[in-house]
Amino acid sequence: ILIESGKHLLIEKPMAIDSHQCKMLTELAEKYNVLLQIAHMWRFHTEVQAIKKIIDRKLIGEIVQVKGYSIHERWSPAFFGPSTWFINKDLAGGGALIDMGVHAIDTINFLLGDPGCESVYARVRTAYHKNLEVDDCAMLICNYINGVVGYVESAWNSPYAEGSEACIIIFGTKGYARLFPTEVGYYKKGNWKVDHLFKESGSDIEIKNSYFRQTESFIDAILTKKEKTLVPGEAGTEAVKICDAAYLSEKTKQVVYLNSMILKENKE
């Protein structure tokens, strides 16, 4: 209704409960000439953008593999009680993967230049909660069209996390880059060098600022009549489609190829 009335939309992540709905929203936005931005706020984080520039400059060479996670350590939306929509599969589309994992998935997509994912193999489980109808942990292996291999973890109420709530490590042929704590290691004139880029890496203030920046970006795109934003519907769709593929992979216990994946099959 909002799209058909010509309203521009800033949609919270995940964009929808499955990629079928994401595709419908994107097509409607194009039909009615509406600007659509998905609120993947990590793309607007200063440290994420700094690592993106390092990757684009090829300071760490060609990217070989990437590892990311987004985890709630010893906490879960399920603690809100049985009435919360987070743990209702029909309303949320899934659990920790589509809630938390989608952050890591989209941030990896952004850092790699949105190359597109070719296939996913995953294990998606409910292990840390009793009587929960959605997943609380997932492990994905994503093969990207550009040859990069990604490993993604998500969880609610995990007893342990390697660092902050979110972390990504990018491995290149000449070095590595890491988010939270944010640093880059590379060879300079034959010597190994590690640069710690931010003294207060992953600060709460910077996370809040990322939300402000994504809103400012959305407003700026409307005022300047841009056709696309930093996080268009296609990007939101790709992140959810990877989640769909993971759920389907768990169901079939096989590798799922995104181009041949039947939309909504994993929801049946």
Image: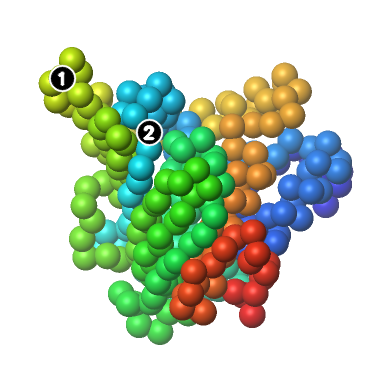
The residue lying toward the viewer, choosing from 153 and 200, is 153
Determine the secondary structure under disc 1: loop
- For residue 158, side relative to residue 97 (left or right): left
**Above or below 53: residue 254:** below
**Above or below 236: residue 226:** above
> Badge 2 local density, few (<14 within 10 Å), some, or many (20+)?
some
Which mark, residue 190?
1
> Badge 1 local density, few (<14 within 10 Å), some, or many (20+)?
few
Q: Amino acid at mark 2?
A: Glu
Q: Amino acid at mark 1?
A: Gly
Residue at x 38% of width, y 33% of height: 62
Q: Quadrant of residue 90?
A: bottom right
- For residue 26, side relative to residue 190 (left or right): right
Tell me, yes or no, if residue 117 can be seen here: yes
Residue at x 43% of width, y 79% of height: 132
Residue at x 65% of width, y 39% of height: 232
Tell me, yes or no, if residue 80 can be seen here: no
**Residue 110 coordinates in the image, percent (x, y):** 49, 38
Which mark, residue 62?
2
Give the spatial CA distance, label 1 vs label 2: 18 Å
**Residue 160 coordinates in the image, percent (x, y):** 20, 60
Question: Which of disc 2 and disc 1 is earlier in sequence?
Answer: 2
Which mark, residue 8?
none
**Above or below 245: residue 132:** below
Determine the secondary structure under disc 2: loop
Residue at x 66% of width, y 45% of height: 234
Marks 1,2: beta carbons within 8 A = no
